[in-house]
Amino acid sequence: MAEDYLAAVGYQFSQESFASYIHAFQQVTVLKMAEIWMLVPVMKLVLMEHIAELGRRLLEDPSGSYAIRDAIRGLQEIKQTSWKVVTEPLILF
């Protein structure tokens, strides 16, 4: 789910798009609190994998434009997000 979300937003994380994505997902399948919290480290991992892949491509073709900056910025946004504030409204009872 983390990979699908990040791919859908072009690996540019934002609190608003994340909350909208989770709200839409929960219209079909309600997530447990632990599942929502696990999305944070998984998104970090997905972004680091994506950055590594873009870096590999850049080494192979230095003239290409691979949007590494956007992925790194997304990783920084995830690290700086106040997750308690973001996740609490997403927990459905």
Image: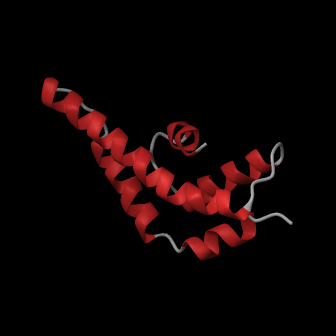
In this figure, what is the number of numbered marks?
0
At 74% from the left and 45% from the top, the residue drawn is 25
Residue 9 against residue 18 in the figure, above or below? above
At 25% from the left and 32% from the top, the residue drawn is 65
The quarter holding residue 58 reads top left
Q: Residue furthest top?
A: 61
Quadrant into which the N terminus falls: top right
Q: Is residue 21 left or right of residue 5?
A: right
The quarter holding residue 59 reads top left
Q: How is the image coloured?
A: secondary structure
Q: Is residue 62 left or right of residue 48?
A: left
At 40% from the left and 47% from the top, the residue drawn is 47
Residue 22, image x, y percentages: 69, 52
Residue 29, image x, y percentages: 81, 45
Residue 39, image x, y percentages: 57, 55
Q: Is residue 75 left or right of residue 29?
A: left
Quadrant into which the C terminus falls: bottom right
Q: Is residue 72 left or right of residue 4?
A: left
The quarter holding residue 57 reads top left
Q: Residue furthest right?
A: 93
Residue 91, image x, y percentages: 76, 65
